[in-house]
Image (cartoon, grey):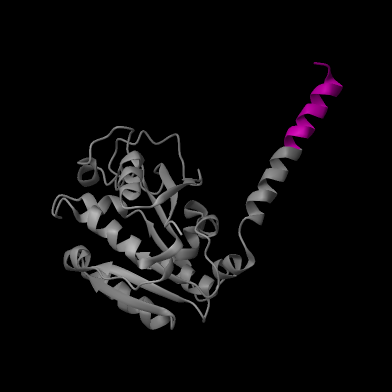
Amino acid sequence: MNATRRAASILAALAVTAAGGAAVAAQVPAHVAAALADKARPEADVKRDAARKPGEMLAFGEVKPGQKVVDLVMGGGYFTRLLSAAVGPNGRVYAYQPTEFVQFQASYGENLKKVAAERANVTPIQATFGEMDLPDGVDLVFTVQNYHDLHLTPFPKDTAQKVNAEVFKSLKPGGVYLIADHSASAGAPLDVAMSLHRIDQAIVRREVEAAGFRYEGEIPLLRDAADARTVNVFQPAIRGKTDQFVMKFRKPR
């Protein structure tokens, strides 16, 4: 290839890359961008945006103003605040925190109360996984880095089955169930949920489809080929840099 053709090839590649970047940016709608820019968000949350890519996550989950959504295991409230801003004053966010987590660490209960007090459109829900009763007719159930917890050994073996059934009941026909979690190696047994806090995404898909959901695809937003997927996600060397899957399911109409 001569110099002129090589230069043209490089310019064409750059143009494709630029176009691709613009396409990704365009996938984040204005109301989600506004939620990211919300001045009420804690500075610590904003600093995590680059790694967590929440704009694209909410866009993939089809979050819209006026919706009713569930943040399933809200943790510290990072996504609860974003969902609250994105659905707006006419929407509603149900922030669920498992009693098991609150009993393990009191700050989980404090986070639930704090975010609900900050946001008028956030309704707190605290119950055990087995007693969880989500509102009916919601548009979206959104859970990030928590599905593997349904397979922790202290919980009954049918916990995931019961939670998925409750999510299915709660969602309106056509509603979305979005799941993101730390990826385990393909074929990894369920016990890595306890030892590594990861899960094989094939297991997740199989369980969720068994509950009646239709798989709609995934996005590679949080993929990281540098993660061997065999190390506990809380190890300092890998924390915040794990390979994660993001899958979308839909309740049939």
Q: Which corner quadrant holds the N terminus? A: top right
Q: Is residue 110 above or below residue 156?
A: below
In the image shown, does 75 or 30 lie closer to the viewer?
A: 30
Q: Quadrant of residue 202?
A: top left
Is 2 one of the magenta-colored residues? yes
- Residue 56 in percent (x, y) is at 55, 55
Q: Is residue 82 above or below residue 19?
A: below
Which residue is at 40% across, 71% downward? 137
Q: In the image, which residues are magenta?
A: 1-14
- Residue 164 in percent (x, y) is at 30, 57
Q: How many marks?
A: 0
Which residue is at 27% across, 47% downward? 197
Q: Is residue 192 above or below residue 37?
A: above
Q: Quadrant of residue 227?
A: top left
Drawn side of residue 201 relative to residue 88, left or right: left
Is 143 one of the magenta-colored residues? no
Drawn side of residue 219 relative to residue 117, left or right: right
Drawn side of residue 229 relative to residue 109, left or right: right
Q: Residue furthest right?
A: 4
- Residue 219 in percent (x, y) is at 51, 45
- Residue 77 in percent (x, y) is at 38, 68
Which residue is at 66% across, 56% downward? 26
Q: Is residue 181 above or below residue 134?
A: above
Q: Main secondary structure of the magenta part?
A: helix
Asked whether residue 75 appears in the rendered view, the answer is no
